[in-house]
Amino acid sequence: MKNIYKLLIALVVLVGSTELTKAQGNYQAPWPGSSFKYSFGPMDSGNTTKWYVSTEANVNATPIADPTNHFTISAIDGTGASVTDGVLTGQGVSQVTINWAGAATGTYYVYLKVFDGDETQCFNVKGFRVDVVSGAFNAIAENVTGGTSTDVTKRGEVDDSKILATDCPDESTINPIANDGAYSLGTTEVVYRVKREFSMNNWHLKFGLSVGTVKYVYGQDNNEITETATNEYDVSAANDYVLVYVTVPNVEDAAQDVTLTVDAANTKDLVTTTTDQGSTPANDPVDNAATYTIKAIPTIGNMVDLN
Amino acid sequence: MKINTVYKTLMAFAMIILSLASASGQDAYTVVRNSKIKYGVSANTEVQIYEWKVYTDTDLSIEADASSECKLTPVLGEPHSINVEWLGDGTYYLTLYATGTNGCTNKKAWKYTVVSTAVIAFDEIESSDCADDVHTFATLTVAELTVGNALAESQYPLKLNYEVTINGETKSYSADVDYDDQLLNIEGITEDVGNDKTYTIKIVEAKTKFGGEIQLGSDITHTRTIYALPPVSTINHN
């Protein structure tokens, strides 16, 4: 009877995402690799608190003793916190941060056991179910042409308010002198954003282009990403999206639809190996392709002496 | 024998190369100063606006001066054409901007070199004839864009003004010189069987078909002598 102490573990107060700027699921359904704060409300500073995670849903649930492929846990408040065999023990720890591992999968229960004083005293315990999003990975392609910066240090950034679905070819790149050896109609730069969902892990991107060639690819962190094979890139976990800059040769008298299509079978989470195609819920093929239309420019023929 | 054959072959090649080099002449983009030429591209129904400009730099940023370098005049009802007056020596970029009905613009430029080096002269500076009933006379001219480079066929017929002087009396004439024979037909020469006559023919002005200015070379005066026939007495019957 003593172990059910009158201690009140109050309302479940769960603090949301620590990094609000990045999508990473939510505290009840976090993506692998994401990080959330959890709390059941204030704890008395003199009470011993034990936080642990289990796959079992009962009062005697066994803590996951080796959390390597599941999570890491750390205290936000309280005193004397330390983690042993996956259990975070401290005084009055009311908030913790849990980083869900990239390989985390399935249902977990986050428990708080609080003693009315030291560990010999009566305790109360409460758990909270967390379903880590598993077996899911989605890549989404979007046209962001016009929204990128000319600043080389900001090649990973997009101003969504400036995105255009279609525009004229880039006239400034035309090398117009027809009789001096270097005539060229020039090129137009088209930019796509490929986002990933349901994972915070390193990921791999492969795509195809209907026309044009890749100029360079930049991550959300403004760093250039090296191509590993033709139109394939390994993207570090820090980047929820990459920007693919494409160079398209201009043509006369015809509009050009420039489409980037994510290769769903080969675009995947590098930790869980879940592919865009094999994702649960099923991959949505509609979001794999994005198109930008380069408008036509009129043909200018050869110069003729009309006298 | 073999060496001789090789030598002959090499010589033949050398001749071919030389003839090719000398045949290079004036291209379509080299223009004689003061030429007025109408240029154009094929009409394109997709184009809503044609805009012609002429620049002096490859970046197409410095427009040529209309009074001293190059003057453009629109061709009425024919916006895909332009009248160009090349006024100053130099390199120019005649540029066309064509804007489609969708508002998108294409551009193309052509590099032209304007020169004032064209020179004309007579091939021979003197000739003579015995007086007879044929009073026509034509003599060969030589027109070059630069030394050794013939003026292109497109520049013909050349428009020449010349003077013919005899006994201190000068008359002015005009004539065209065609590309095919390059001959200047001279008027005002009479063949007098009774007296020797010496005519002085002088080119005073020469222009290309387009009004381009041709300089006068050193041999622009041709002396034509018509020799009288020796008198022959009436046959005496003894």
Image (tube, coloured by chain):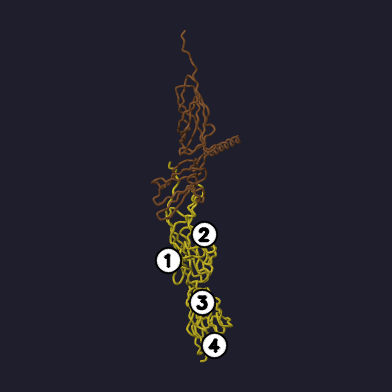
Chain colours: A yellow, B brown
For the residues beneath circles 3 and 1, the answer to whether they share a chain is yes
Give the chain letter at badge 2: A
Q: Residue A165, percent across and down? A: 43, 61
Question: Is the residue marked by circle 1 packed among few (<14), some (14-19), or many (20+) residues within 10 Å?
Answer: few
For the residues marked 2 and 1, what is the alpha-carbon distance in whole angstroms? 25 Å
For the residues marked 2 and 4, what is the alpha-carbon distance in whole angstroms? 61 Å
Check contact, mark 1 vs mark 4: CB within 8 A: no
For the residues beneath circles 2 and 3, the answer to whether they share a chain is yes
Q: Residue B170, percent across and down? A: 48, 28
For the residues beneath circles 3 and 4, the answer to whether they share a chain is yes
Q: Which mark is residue A115?
A: 4
The residue type indicated by label 3 comes to Phe
Check contact, mark 2 vs mark 3: CB within 8 A: no
Q: For the residues carrying marks 3 and 1, which lies nearer the camera in this image? A: 3
Q: Is residue A237 above or below residue B62?
A: below
Name the one closer to the observer, A40 or B219. B219
Q: Which mark is residue A286?
A: 1
Give the chain letter at badge 4: A
First in sequence, mark 1 or 4: give its number. Answer: 4
Q: Is residue A84 above or below residue B180?
A: below
Residue hosting label 2 = A215
Residue hosting label 3 = A36
Q: Residue at x 54, y 63 (%)?
A: A153
